[in-house]
Image (cartoon, rainbow, N blue to C red):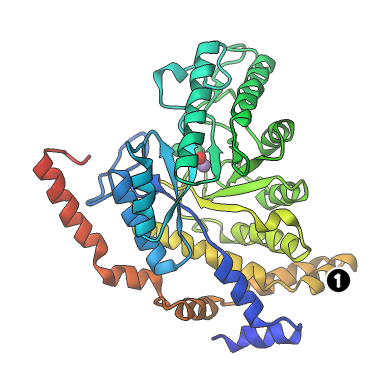
């Protein structure tokens, strides 16, 4: 255990056990699609043994949970993960110590969605898109998940291509039909992204638009912040603060970016930003903000050149690290410095927490859980990646499936 951290907390009358309990309660959902082959528009490199169906993705996700202890949920994407028997899929997840989490509808890969889905000018297309989301709601009910995570590719490429206000009204109409189909307790998380695949306008481009939609729909609709979906330089921590204050922060899709929607390992490019995000959440939580304790933390990454399972473990560890550091912020000293107008004193309160080495603390939390203190080493030592590479390639060859 890090006595440095313990001593510093003691000086403030904070017990290390409280911090450990908060770390133990924290969990992150991993995405099924992060275990399969994915890439860029230039090339998809096949990873030997990469999962190619829901069972394999769940098996891989179970390895991440096994070594980190904080990833019991797995988000699914329909139709990529469509199963004939959802009861069986749910039971298989249960046997692995997992549960199926957020259900992500896919409104961007059907030919009929070329000019939009929920915002399309053709009512028949809109109805088809709404029906797909309602099917996802039914799947969520079957697997006992209570989150629908909606990302919309809708938008236009050229000025004048469609009427922007009419698109908005159609979208709201479609969302109302979806909202009406939500059973009690199920949440609709509305994701936004500033561009891509559309380049002139995107129907849900920013957190404000998603928030307006959520507020019009009702309390079961909330905003989902994907950390890769903002223009360069956007202050995501401030967006998080505003959503927390409005009690509409539904969840996160964590990943990191340098240029666009890069979907890189969380915290690999801008770890301080990740810390600042968690600082807002920890600060709100310390003041009893109701939203802070019911945030769906999820990863949304696709791995191009990385080994997929290890990349996921690394992301989970980076998230946990940032969260633990945010818990160490001296909130009283911070507020005092802020209200004394001590600009740099306040900054230094954050800096002290950010620069604290929390690795011994996290190792301690893992050991208390019966886990290896070093999850990456444990995963590498397990030989799992090599074993599935052999077995899955052999299975693919014997079935004639090329595995690409
Ligand atoms: C989008 C967005 C969604 C994800 C798709 C595959 O950029 O991040 O959340 O489901 O990609
Ligand atoms: Mn996303
Ligand atoms: Mn994305």
Q: Which of these two is toward me, 96 or 377?
A: 96
- Residue under pointer 1: 336
Say above or below: 275 vs 143: below
Report how many numbered discs are placed on residues in the image.
1
Quarter that holds the C terminus: top left
Q: Is residue 190 left or right of residue 103?
A: right
Q: Is residue 130 left or right of residue 53?
A: right
Say above or below: 146 vs 322: above
**Where does the image place residue 252, in percent across and percent down from the top left?**
58, 49
Picture quadrant where residue 383 is located? bottom left
**Where does the image place residue 290, in percent across and percent down from the top left?**
74, 56
Of helix, strand and loop, which one carries label 1? helix
**Where does the image place residue 362, in percent across and percent down from the top left?**
52, 75
Say above or below: 248 vs 155: below
Q: Residue at x 62, y 11 (%)?
A: 160
Q: Residue at x 56, y 31 (%)?
A: 195
Q: Is residue 306 visible?
A: no
Q: Residue at x 74, y 48 (%)?
A: 247
**Where does the image place residue 157, in percent across and percent down from the top left?**
54, 19
Quarter that holds the N terminus: bottom right
């Amino acid at each position: 255990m890090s006595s440095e951290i313990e001593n510093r907390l003691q000086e403030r009358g904070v017990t290390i056990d409280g911090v450990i309990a908060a770390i133990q309660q924290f969990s992150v959902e991993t995405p099924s699609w992060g275990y399969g082959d994915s890439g860029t528009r230039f090339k998809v490199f096949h990873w030997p043994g990469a999962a190619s169906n829901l069972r394999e993705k769940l098996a891989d996700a179970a390895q991440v949970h096994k070594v980190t202890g904080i990833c019991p949920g797995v988000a699914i994407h329909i139709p990529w993960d469509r199963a004939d028997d959802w009861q069986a899929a749910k039971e298989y997840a249960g046997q692995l110590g997992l549960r199926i989490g957020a259900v992500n509808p896919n409104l961007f890969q059907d030919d009929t969605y070329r000019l939009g889905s929920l915002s399309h000018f053709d009512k028949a297309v809109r109805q088809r898109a709404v029906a797909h989301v309602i099917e996802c709601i039914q799947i969520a009910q079957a697997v006992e998940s209570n989150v629908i995570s909606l990302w919309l590719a809708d938008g236009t490429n050229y000025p004048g291509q469609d009427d922007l206000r009419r698109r908005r009204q159609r979208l709201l109409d479609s969302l109302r039909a979806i909202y009406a189909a939500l059973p009690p307790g199920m949440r609709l998380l509305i994701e936004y992204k500033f561009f891509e695949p559309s380049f002139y306008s995107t129907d849900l481009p920013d957190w404000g638009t998603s928030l307006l939609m959520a507020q019009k729909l009702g309390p079961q609709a909330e905003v989902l912040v994907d950390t890769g979906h903002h223009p360069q330089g956007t202050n995501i921590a401030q967006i998080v603060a505003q959503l927390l204050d409005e009690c509409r922060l539904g969840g996160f899709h964590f990943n990191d970016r340098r240029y666009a929607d890069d979907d890189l390992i969380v915290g690999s490019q801008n770890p301080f930003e990740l810390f600042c995000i968690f600082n807002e959440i920890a600060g709100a939580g310390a003041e009893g903000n109701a939203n802070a304790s019911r945030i769906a933390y999820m990863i949304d990454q696709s791995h191009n050149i990385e080994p997929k399972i290890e990349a996921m473990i690394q992301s989970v560890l980076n998230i946990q690290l940032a969260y633990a550091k945010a818990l160490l912020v001296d909130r009283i000293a911070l507020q005092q410095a802020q209200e004394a107008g001590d600009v740099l004193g306040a900054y230094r309160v954050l800096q002290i927490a950010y620069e604290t080495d929390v690795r011994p603390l996290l190792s301690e939390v893992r050991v208390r859980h019966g886990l290896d203190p070093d999850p990456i080493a444990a995963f590498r030592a397990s030989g799992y990646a090599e074993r599935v590479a052999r077995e899955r390639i052999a299975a693919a060859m014997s079935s004639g499936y090329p595995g690409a």
